[in-house]
Image (cartoon, rainbow, N blue to C red):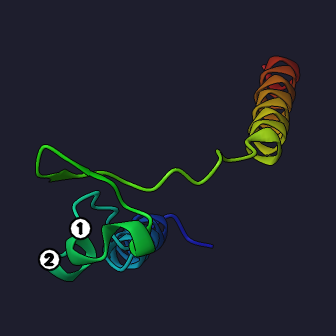
Amino acid sequence: MSAARRPLLTATAAGTLLCALWFVPSANATGEQHAQVGASSAGAEVHGGEPRLAETGGIDTTPYLLGGATFLAVGAGFVTLAMRQSGRAS
């Protein structure tokens, strides 16, 4: 690959990532008006006129922690490998 195409590919990848992130839905914690009418059936509690999210019993974060630790270890391994190879080259 020529060196002239690298910035173009980098810009294309960055633009693609930004376009993909544009479609990620936002997580708003405010409810709609019809959700407040049937608060007990919808699972939302209203205290003092402010809607609250329903209690779902918590989220099992174990897979997220294991996945994050795995990616961190793989990234650290790549950095270590790159440092070793740059030391050999010079």
Q: How many marks?
A: 2
Q: Is residue 33 above or below residue 56?
A: below
> Dot 1, how many residues are within 10 Å of its Cα: few (below 14), some (14-19), or many (20+)?
few
CA distance for labels 2 and 1:
7 Å
Instruction: Report whether 71 appears left or right of 58.
Output: right
The reply to whether discs 2 and 1 touch (Cβ–Cβ < 8 Å) is: yes
Amino acid of disc 2: Gln
Q: At 34% across and 78% down in the image, what residue appears?
A: 19
**Quadrant location, the N terminus:** bottom right
Residue 89 percent across, percent down from the top left: 82, 26
Instruction: Report whether 40 appears left or right of 75.
Output: left
Instruction: Report whether 55 appears left or right of 61.
Output: left
**Quadrant location, the C terminus:** top right
**Residue ID for mark 2:** 33
- The residue lying toward the viewer, choosing from 44 and 75, is 44
Q: At 86% across and 30% down in the image, what residue appears?
A: 77
- The residue lying toward the viewer, choosing from 53 and 73, is 53
Q: At 35% across and 69% down in the image, what residue appears?
A: 18
Q: Is residue 37 above or below residue 45?
A: below
Amino acid of disc 1: Gly
- The residue lying toward the viewer, choosing from 15 and 20, is 20
**Residue ID for mark 1:** 31
